[in-house]
Amino acid sequence: MADPINILVTGGQGQIGQALAKVRWAPGVNLLRPTRAELDLTDPEALNACFERQPFHAVINAAAFTAVDLAETHVGDAMLSNALVPARLADLTRRADIPLVHISTDFVFDGESDHPYAEHDPANPINVYGASKRAGELAVLSGHPRGVVVRTAWVVSARGRNFARKILEAAAHQDVLSVVADTIGSPTSADDLARALETVTTAMISDPSAPTGVYHCVNAGQASWAELATELVGLAGLATTVVAIPAAQYPSSARRPRNSRLSCGRLYSDHGVTMRDWRTALADVVSEIERERLRS
Ligand SMILES: NC(=O)c1ccc[n+]([C@@H]2O[C@H](COP(=O)([O-])OP(=O)(O)OC[C@H]3O[C@@H](n4cnc5c(N)ncnc54)[C@H](OP(=O)(O)O)[C@@H]3O)[C@@H](O)[C@H]2O)c1
């Protein structure tokens, strides 16, 4: 039997990490998804020891300090997890000569553009989280010739903390929900993203000269948060009314880009990956949330 192909998924217990575990990987692929208690990524010795203990064939970094508002007051913590840890991972994977697939975000853009952002558009983060993630991107791209950055946005799934679960929980108890309408993005199923990550990672493992750089990966189409909430409520068959409000009426510590749309051209041209429409993907997410609800 062929040797197993070991892939370390950091942040593997998070929303996207769990989606990666659901993907049907090629036979022999073994995903290692240590918890934070098993591997604290901010501990350089633990990280070094993890790489010395076991040879990996690739690393997918799905770990991050993802609390966008909290990052405004926890700048050091955000920079540590989102910039310094990716830099260390880039160094370790470069030395092991294995690919690093690093997940990043639409929040590296300022949202002032009126078109979907392409991979080559200039980054200009407008909050601490975005700045820390941009620093992580640069560390990966400059630190490892086999480093890839995959930016995504507005991720929803039946697992973890996300907008879909939050809205459906609120809608189960409230007749009216006020949701921001002047911020638009590309809602993305964590499962669809995970399948694309599998394609990119597999290509990078099998071909050392596979293309590198930045990829965007979101479901096709666009929505405002209010439109996304309306679709969620409708798919779940709830009677809750979604009232559209301006972002100014929903104050938060961190500024958010008003346009978070991403175009995924490189994913298709390099890997043949097309992303389906967000509404179709969302229907699957809501069905799974409903199945989980009935099971619990
Ligand atoms: N969710 C979105 O809408 C979205 C949008 C754009 C980009 N992204 C990017 O996607 C990636 C994953 O997001 P997600 O939604 O899966 O986030 P998540 O559910 O918050 O998962 C992040 C995971 O990282 C782990 N982690 C953080 N710091 C760690 C550390 N020092 N040591 C070990 N583990 C650590 C967390 O562990 P704990 O649970 O113990 O904290 C958690 O399991 C991130 O890079 C994020 O920037 C997400």
Image (spheres, rainbow, N blue to C red):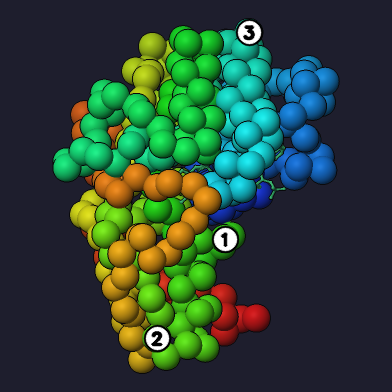
| Residue farthest toward the left in the current orientation of the protein | 115
> Quick one: 87 or 242, which is closer to the camera?
242
Q: Which residue position holds label 2?
A: 176
Q: Residues within 10 Å of mark 3 (few under 14, many from 20)?
A: few
User: Of helix, strand and loop, which one carries label 2?
Assistant: strand
Label 3, label 2: how far apart the Cα atoms are: 54 Å
In the picture, which quadrant includes the C terminus?
Answer: bottom right
Disc 1: residue Cβ within 8 A of ligand 1's nearest atom? yes
- Left or right: where 169 falls relative to 49: left
3 and 2 marks in contact (CB < 8 Å): no
Earlier-in-chain disc, 3 versus 1? 3
Q: Residue at horizontal 37%, vertical 20%? A: 213
Kind of residue at disc 3: Arg
Q: Amino acid at mark 2?
A: Val
Q: Where, by quadrant of the figure, is residue 148 drawn? A: top left
**Residue 232: x and y, percent?**
36, 74
**For mark 1, does the 10 Å Cα neighbourhood hold few (<14), some (14 to 19), or many (20 or more) residues?**
few
The residue carrying mark 1 is: 161
Mark 3, residue position: 95
Is there any visible trace of residue 160 in the rendered image?
Answer: yes
Instruction: Give the amino acid type for the residue marked by disc 1 in the picture.
Output: Arg
Estimate the x, y position of residue 194 in percent, counting from the top left.
45, 46
Instruction: Please identify the quarter of the rendering in which residue 206 is found.
Output: top left
Between the C-alphas of marks 3 and 1, the distance is 34 Å
Mark nearer the viewer, 3 or 1: 1
